[in-house]
Image (cartoon, rainbow, N blue to C red):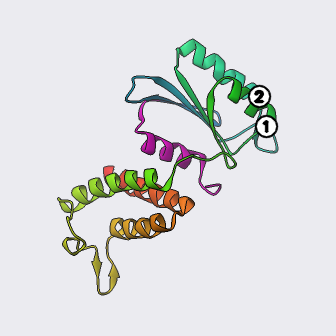
Amino acid sequence: MSSVSVEDKAALLMAVKGYECEKRHNFNGRTDLVLDDDSGDKILMRLIIQTKSRSGTVGVDAVKNMVETMELGKYNKGILISKRFSKAAQMEMKQQSIQMLSDKHMLSLGPRELYLKMEDYVNELCKTKCGRIPQEASDCKGLSEDGYCCEIRQVSDNATFHFKRGWIALLQRDLSRLLAIHDSMKK
């Protein structure tokens, strides 16, 4: 998942956990998302895309700033996403119970959870594109003798193959592709 962008990691987490974005605030090199979940918790998800350090590492000051924002905004949970975090930042996040996602600390999702979420997206996309959800493989016109003519079907078939082998990184990539298709169909 290290090749996945900060924004894509956020989208994956939101899709799998069922978070809805209530508000979005863009700042210099950072994006704050106010999320809502089924339990009614108010969640702050902060994406740090650019850092001031040359190494691109997020330091403890950024974590302390987030803690202040969470206290002022009365958030129940916090999620901080970036490429890299310093050891001090990691320790502070652990102390403050802020969930961390980075190139080294990825989504802790099993293949089954990812695959089930993908099935939901595939069904929704099929219904949007073709007007119905195929009940059997033969009901879907996305595969012909010449190969795939539907990107949704291709991603779905790839995901089934990756799920059977337990390849989580490829399943995450498949879900990212479905999210991109979903977003492009919305426009």
Relative horizontal placement of residue 93, taking residue 32 as reference (left or right)? right
Quadrant for the N terminus in the image: bottom right
Task: Give the magenta range.
Answer: 1-23
Q: Above or below — where is 137 with respect to 4? A: below
Element type at marker 2? helix
In the image, what residue occupies the spot 23% across and 74% down? 141
Q: Above or below — where is 68 with respect to 12? A: above
Q: In the rendered structure, which amino acid carries the disc numbered 1?
A: Ser
Relative horizontal placement of residue 169, taking residue 128 as reference (left or right)? right
Judging by the rendered image, the residue that carries numbered circle 1 is 86
Residue 58 is situated, as x and y percent measured from the top left of the image, at 74, 36
Separation of disc 1 and disc 2 at Cα? Answer: 7 Å
Mark 2 is surrounded, within 10 Å at the Cα level, by few (under 14), some (14 to 19) or many (20 or more) other residues, namely some
User: Does label 1 or label 2 sit earlier along the sequence?
Assistant: 2
Quarter of the image holding residue 152? Answer: bottom left
Element type at marker 1? loop
Contact check, label 1 and label 2, Cβ < 8 Å: yes
Residue 105 is situated, as x and y percent measured from the top left of the image, at 66, 45
Judging by the rendered image, the residue that carries numbered circle 2 is 60
Residue 56 is situated, as x and y percent measured from the top left of the image, at 76, 43
Quarter of the image holding residue 69? Answer: top right
In the image, what residue occupies the spot 32% across and 86% down? 146
Residue 34 is situated, as x and y percent measured from the top left of the image, at 48, 27
